[in-house]
Image (cartoon, rainbow, N blue to C red):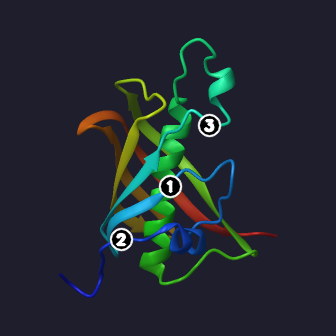
Amino acid sequence: MSEQAVTSMDIHEILDHLPHRYPFMLVDRVVSLEVGKEIVAIKNVSMNEPFFPGHFPYHPVMPGVLIVEAMAQAAAILSFKTMNTKPSDDSVYYFAGIDSARFKKPVSPGDQLVLKVKIDRILRGIWKYSGQALVDDVVVAEAEMMCILKAIE
C-alpha cells in the first residue's frame, strides 16, 4: 500500500474535510481513499432522514438528486485530500456540472449506499469525476460530475 492510500476515515476526519453539516451531510464513513485517484465511502440511509416524510410518506425513497449529492460529497473529500488542504470559510467547492446521471433502482430506509468515485481529470481547476452508488453490490445510480473550488467574494 502506498503512502498515498488512506485505509479509512471516521466521522471526525470527514468533518475536517467536508464543509457540509446536518441535515445535508451525506457521507458517514470513508472505507478507502487513494489520493489523486479514487474514494469509496458509505452513506447509511435511515428512516430518520429529513426528506423521507415528504418523499414519499407512503413509500419512502431517497431522492436521486441527493444520491448524486452524496457522490459529490465523497468527491469533495477526495479532492481536499488530493490537494492536501481542508475546506475554509473563504472558499466553496461547487458543482460545475452533472452528466449522464442514471437512476437504476430506488434507495430506501435501511439501505447502505456505497459511494465509489474516481477522478477522471483535473484541468484549469475543474475536477471531473465518474461516480457510482451501490446497494448490496448493485448499482443504483451513476453520474459524471464536475466540481470547482471557488473563492467567496
- What is the quadrant of the N terminus in the image? bottom left
> Separation of disc 1 and disc 2 at Cα?
13 Å
The residue located at (59%, 75%) in the rendering is 16
| Residue 28 x %, y % | 49, 56
Give the farthest residue toward the right.
153
* Residue on which the image places disc 2: 8
Q: Is mark 3 on a helix, strand or loop?
A: loop
Q: What element carries label 2?
A: loop
| Residue 43 x %, y % | 46, 48
The residue located at (38%, 30%) in the rendering is 102
Mark 2 Cα-neighbour bin, 10 Å: few <14, some 14–19, many ≥20: some
Of the pair 13 and 130, the residue shown nearer to us:
13
Q: What residue type is labelled 1?
A: Val
Image position of 100 with respect to 38: above or below: above
Q: Which amino acid does label 3 sit on?
A: Asn
Lower position in the chain sequence, tag 1 or tag 3: 1
Mark nearer the viewer, 3 or 2: 3
* Residue on which the image places disc 3: 48
| Residue 143 x %, y % | 39, 41
* Residue on which the image places disc 1: 27
| Residue 89 x %, y % | 75, 74
Q: Is mark 1 on a helix, strand or loop?
A: loop
Where is residue 21, by image quadrant? bottom right
> Separation of disc 3 and disc 2 at Cα?
25 Å
Of the pair 120 and 52, the residue shown nearer to us:
52
Lower position in the chain sequence, tag 3 or tag 2: 2
Mark 3 Cα-neighbour bin, 10 Å: few <14, some 14–19, many ≥20: few
